[in-house]
Amino acid sequence: MDFVSEKIKALPPYLFSRIQKRKKQLEKEGKDIIDLGIGAPDLPTPSFIIDTLVNEVQKPENHRYSSYTGTDEFRQAVAHFYQKQYGVKLDPDEEVLALVGSKEGIAHFIPAVINQGEKVLVPNPGYPVYRSAVHLAGGNAIDLPLNAEQNGEPVFEELSDEALQDSKLMLLNYPGNPTAATVQKSTFLKAVTYAEKYQLAIAHDAAYSLTTFDGYQAPSMMEVPGAKEYAVEFGSLSKSFNMTGWRIGYVVGNREMIKALATYKSNVDTSQFIPVQKAAVAALTSDLSAVSEHNAIYQQRRDRMLNALTSIGIHASKPRGTFFIWAPVPQGYSSMEFADRLLTELGVIVTPGNAFGSAGEGYFRISLSVPDERLNEAVKRIEKLHMGGDS
Ligand SMILES: *Cc1c(COP(=O)(O)O)cnc(C)c1O
C-alpha cells in the first residue's frame, strides 16, 4: 500500500537535513559544533509575559475553547498595537484574526484565497514555507526576483506582463528572511500599485517587524493608503518577544481575505489557548522595552560577526533588521561547498543560500540567535579561516 499523497511526495527536498546529519556525525566524533543555522531566538521569553501566562492558566474560565477568531481582547490588543506603532486604524472584529503562529496562518491563507492551478508570486530567495504552502494548496509558484545585490527589494520590472496578469497573489516579507532586507514605505506603495494594476492580492509576512537596528523602524504595509483593499499582513510574537514555542500570531488587513482564512481555519483549529492569548496581550500592549533589549543584543552580535567576515574578505551588507546576516560566498565556491567547508574545518554551521530557493545560490545565511559566548567562539574560528590569496 501507498499511504502517502502525491502532494507530500512532491514537496521540495529539505536541504537542512543533510547538514543536520553531518552535524550529528561530527558531534559523535567529539567535535564541538556551533549551529548558526538556527532560525529562532536563543533568549528567554520576558518574565512579565511568562507571569501573565502562569496567572491566567490558573483560571478555569480560561480552559475552554477560545472563540474561532481569537478573543476580543487579543484582537483589540493587535488593533491597539497597530494604532500606536504605525498610526493605522483596524477594526478588531473584521480586520484582525488570531493565528496559531504566523506559519499556520500563511499556510492556511493560501488555500483560502487561491484555486487549483492558480499562480502565486513567491520571493526567491524566501522562507521555504511559502513555496511548500503554494504547492500543498495546488497552486503554482512563480519566482518573484529580489534585488539581492542591493537592497533585497522585489524587482517587479523583471516579471513579464503575462506573469503579473496570470497571478492571483503576491507574497512579500520585510524585514526579510533569509536576506535580512529592509525597505521603506515606498516599496509597499509600489507593491500596492502593482496589485491595483494587475488585480493581485498581497500577503505581507512581517514576522521580523520589531526586530530592527540602528534606529530603523520597519513600516507596515497597512500604512499605504488603499492597502486594505488588496493586502493582508501577517505578524508574529515569535521573533520579537522570543515566543517561538508559544504559537501565537495574527493577520490584519483586507476583510474579505481575513474572513476566508477564518472560515478555512474554523474547519481546522479552534484558535489558540486563552492564557497564551492573554500573555500575548501583555506583550503587545507593553512599552516594547523588552524588544529593544533583545535588539541591542542582536545588534552587537551582528557587528562582531560582520567584522569577522570582513577580516576574511567576505563583505556582507549590514542588516537593519532580522537576526540574520546574508553574505556572499567567496569566489570559487558554491553555497553548499562553502557551508561544508565551514562545518568540516571550523565546526560552524551556516545555511547555504540555495536552501531558500535557486536565487539564494552564491550566498549563505548566518543566524545571530545563539548565546554570546558561542557567537564569540564562532567569530574567533571564522577569523582564523585561511582564505588563500595574499599572505
Ligand atoms: C519564523 C518565521 C515565521 C514563522 O513564525 P511563527 O509565528 O512562529 O509561525 C514566518 N515567517 C518568517 C519569514 C519567519 O522567519
Image (spheres, grey):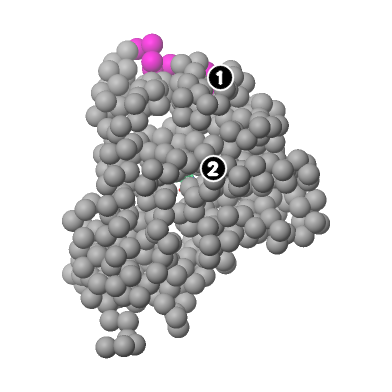
Q: Residue at x 59, y 59 (%)?
A: 146
Residue shown at the point (28%, 81%) measured from the top left: 386
Task: Please determine whether, in this image, residue 29 is positioned above or below residue 278.
Answer: below
Question: Mark 1 or mark 2, which has the lower sequence index?
Answer: 1
Q: Is residue 383 left or right of residue 177?
A: left
The amino acid beneath tag 2 is Asp
Quadrant (top left/top right/bottom left/bottom right) for the N terminus: bottom right
Question: On the picture, is 71 further left or further right than 89?
Answer: left
In this picture, residue 157 sits left or right of residue 109: right
- Closer to the camera, 112 or 321? 321
> Is residue 108 at least partly visible in the picture?
no
For the residue pair 309 and 124, the one nearer the viewer reads as: 309
Quarter of the image containing the C terminus?
A: bottom left
Region rendered in magenta: 60-69
Whether label 1 touches label 2, CB < 8 Å: no
Q: Which residue is mark 1?
A: 92
What element does badge 2 sit on? strand
**What residue appears at the point 27 percent right and 25 percent down from the top-left corner?**
48
Amino acid type of the residue that numbered disc 1 sits on in the rendered structure: Pro
The structure residue drawn at horizontal position 69% and vertical position 50%, both measured from the top left corner, is 120
Q: Position of residue 108 (x, y in %)?
A: 59, 38
Q: Is residue 91 above or below residue 375?
A: above
| Figure check: 251 above or below 329 | above
Say if residue 56 shows up in the picture: yes
Quadrant of the rendered structure where residue 258 is?
Answer: top right
- Dot 2 beta carbon under 8 Å from ligand 1: yes
Q: CA distance from mark 1 to mark 2?
A: 19 Å
- Mark 2 neighbour density, 10 Å: few (under 14) some (14–19) many (20 or more): many
Q: Nearer the viewer, residue 354 or 252?
A: 252
Residue, disc 2:
205
| Residue 340 image position (x, y, % from top left) | 37, 74
Instruction: Give how far across and how far down residue 331 sits, in percent.
Output: 44, 81
